[in-house]
Image (cartoon, grey):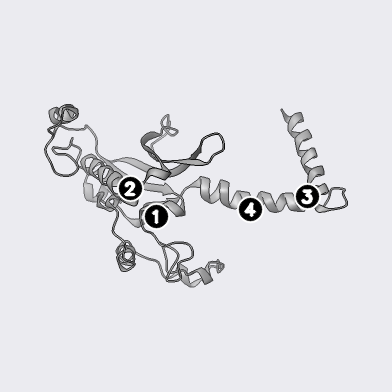
Amino acid sequence: YCEAPAGAKLLPVGVRADGVPCNWDGNESIETVSINLPGLPLPDQYKALRLPVTGLSKRQVAPETWDDIFDVVSWSFSAAALGNFPSKRHDGTDFTSRSDRHRKRKANQSLNYKACLVEVRGDWDFFANVFHFPRWRQNSGCCWKCDCKPDGVRDVGMDAAWRRNRTSHVELMARILQHGCSINPIFKVPWISSKIFRIDWLHCADLGCAADFLGNLLLLLSRKFPGPNHAERVKALWRRIVRLRCLLL
């Protein structure tokens, strides 16, 4: 999709954003943004590579901060798409400070590669707060990929209406503006589309489907254990799990 208009082979790059609990009791969260290199041909020795971009205390992040961060990210991807080191700072000003000396020396020189943004991963809360995507309980439409509303999320059949009414990138941008929100600077990245925004595996599987499945499985199994009430049967199940774990280890 990106290589066709670029007329060149591109390095695929992904961006992931998420909050990471910290402190001994997990009462604080560090908002992180990192990049990775998905879709590389095998052998893929860089599949676990994560390059940090930011790590900020959630308590100290204002909404405008994210716009500033992704303004820089967008500037960086624009340079990567052209395949040259940038000639100016992200705000259009010249490289003048002492910390810009190495950038000034490399201005307009070749990067020896061209790259594009192919996926943005995070949870729904981050997408809603930072990119102003619809929220999961928004009555006018709770999805950025279709026109599904909260009362229709349980309609998962192959003939569900939302399957036929997909939201295009332009329509999503219009919805964001209609709700009085601004367009995040990440949408200045060359060739970007709303299709590349994806709920990551941690949130949709590990903390979603897998958690629901295991919860129901353990509830079913607990009913097979002895005990006068549910609490005692759960304790018996847990003791069995601990014994099995010790045997496996």
Q: Is residue 161 or residue 10 the one in the foreground?
A: 161
Q: Mark 2 or mark 1: name the one nearer the start of the chain.
A: 2
Measuring from the top left, give residue 229's x and y in whole percent: 84, 53
> In this figure, which residue is indicated by the disc labeled 4?
212
| Cα distance in 3D space between marks 4 and 1 | 25 Å
Other residues around mark 2 within 10 Å, as few (<14) / some (14–19) / many (≥20): some
Work out whether 39 lies above or below 174: above
Q: Are marks 4 and 3 in contact (CB under 8 Å)?
A: no
Residue 62 image position (x, y, % from top left): 35, 49
Q: Are marks 2 and 1 in contact (CB under 8 Å)?
A: yes
Direction from residue 187 to residue 44 in the image, left or right: right
Which one is earlier in the sequence, the residue at label 4 or at label 1?
1
Q: Give the mark toward the camera: 2 or 4.
A: 2
| CB atoms of marks 4 and 1 within 8 Å | no
Point out which mark residue 221 bears.
3
What amino acid is at disc 4?
A: Asp
Q: Which mark is residue 129?
A: 1
- Residue 221 in the image: above or below residue 181: above
